[in-house]
Amino acid sequence: MRAATVDFFEARGLFRARRDYHGMAGSLADELFTEFFSGASETEKRELARTLISIAIVEEDVPEDYVTEAVLLIGSVSRDVGGQWFHSHVGTIREVLEDPTRFNSWRQPETYNPPKPFREDHRFATSLLFSLYFIDSETAEKVWKLLMSKAAGSDFARYLEDVKSAYLALTESGPASGADA
């Protein structure tokens, strides 16, 4: 399943059509992966989820664009297909989001020249938190509260508010009482 994931990143094999997504249509490219994910067997879905988590969070020597893509795909899959495929990785996601050394980097103002590595950028944290809301909203809410208590008065706090607002707008409800299915 790793090969299929890398094929998506590289727009080859089953995902050659991704090359045709330009401009505004580029945002639709994730649908190619979520459709592929939806059609996979349960075993393959678990392996794809593990692969995305590994690339996004665990592995050190992966191309920066793979990290970014993997984080965004975790969000797309958990939102559009279901977060249950990532449940076994909630602890890993939570550990990363609650890491104080990472938090300090996320709280710093954005830098564009040179840009920060994605894992050090607030967008990494907010994208993972957004995904976590669809995987386990109760845990996401606890993490959100912790991050908000540390981020008070910073741009990062505003970004965290935006994540929660986006989740609520998409679900038209608050956090579930318990893990989401």
Image (spheres, helix red, strand yellow):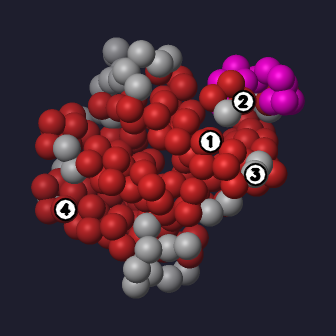
Which amino acid, mark 3?
Answer: Ser
Q: Is residue 112 above or below residue 124?
A: above
- Specify the quadrant of the image occupied by residue 73: top right
Badge 4 crowding class, 10 Å Cα cut-off, few under 14, some 14 to 19, many 20 or more, is few
Counting residues from the N terminus, which is met first, the one under dot 4 or under dot 3?
3
Check disc 2 and report the residue beneath it: 4
Badge 3 crowding class, 10 Å Cα cut-off, few under 14, some 14 to 19, many 20 or more, is few
Q: CA distance from mark 2 to mark 3?
A: 14 Å
Q: Is residue 52 left or right of residue 145?
A: right
Residue 170 in the magenta stretch? The answer is no
Secondary structure of residue under mark 3: loop
Foreground of the two, 81 or 115: 81
Q: Residue at x 67, y 60 (%)?
A: 80
Secondary structure of residue under mark 4: helix
Q: Which mark is residue 41?
A: 3
Range of the magenta residues? 5-17
Magenta region, main secondary structure:
helix
- Specify the quadrant of the image occupied by residue 100: top left
Q: Which mark is residue 33?
A: none
Counting residues from the N terminus, which is met first, the one under dot 2 or under dot 3?
2
Q: Residue at x 73, y 48 (%)?
A: 37
Q: CA distance from mark 1 to mark 2?
A: 9 Å
Q: Residue at x 68, y 60 (%)?
A: 81
Q: Which mark is residue 146?
A: 4
Which amino acid, mark 2?
Answer: Ala
